[in-house]
Amino acid sequence: MRTSDGGELSPRLDEHDWQLLNLLAEDAGVGLPELAELSGLAEAEVTARVQALRESGVVTGIHARVDPKRLGLPMTAFFMVRVAQTSDAYEAIDQMIRDIDQVEEAHALSGQFDWIVKVRAANPDDLRDLLTHKLSLLPGFVRAETMVVMSTSCESINVEALLHPRHT
């Protein structure tokens, strides 16, 4: 069975799978023995479940959560980017955006803008340089609107919300 975008539907997950996903989302460095203890499952079962979650594509990797402020990048901003409406420009931007080190996320959009790009910067000058010396020089760039983040309330996958998915 496939989703509307052509991807595979997620496998049926039970309460133990959701619990393991939540524990891994909170601390990806937790070991299997600790996962077993926290979940109340045997270590062999935890191992099998985590492996099944990886094989099904539900878990695509285990990552460290890095604090950008501690790396000298305390500013977060979003660029709403408009590009020329040609497939060549769109593909070039798609590829080149990935090569800009300070880009943390980039998503193609529908609507007034074509891309939303999340970036990290050291200071306002660094942010300006990123826009004027990198993004604006991409082929097909038309314009960008910058939104600087003042504070962040939540910045992670909310596995708890996924526990109660809406069924359509």
Image (cartoon, helix red, strand yellow):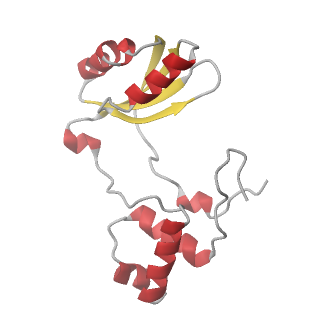
Residue 129 visible at all: yes
In the image: residue 81, left or right of residue 129: right
Residue 40 visible at all: no
Q: Is residue 103 above or below residue 51?
A: above
In the image: residue 9, left or right of residue 159: right
Classify residue 100 by image quadrant: top left
Which residue is pictured at 46% across the width and 15% down the height?
144
Which residue is pictured at 47% across the width and 74% down the height?
50
Residue 25 coordinates in the image, percent (x, y): 44, 62
In the image: residue 6, left or right of residue 99: right
Which residue is pictured at 23% across the width and 29% down the height?
122
Residue 14 coordinates in the image, percent (x, y): 63, 75
Residue 89 coordinates in the image, percent (x, y): 49, 17
Classify residue 111 by image quadrant: top right
Q: Nearer the viewer, residue 141 or 24?
A: 141
Farthest-out residue, top? 142
In the picture, which quadrant includes the N terminus?
Answer: bottom right
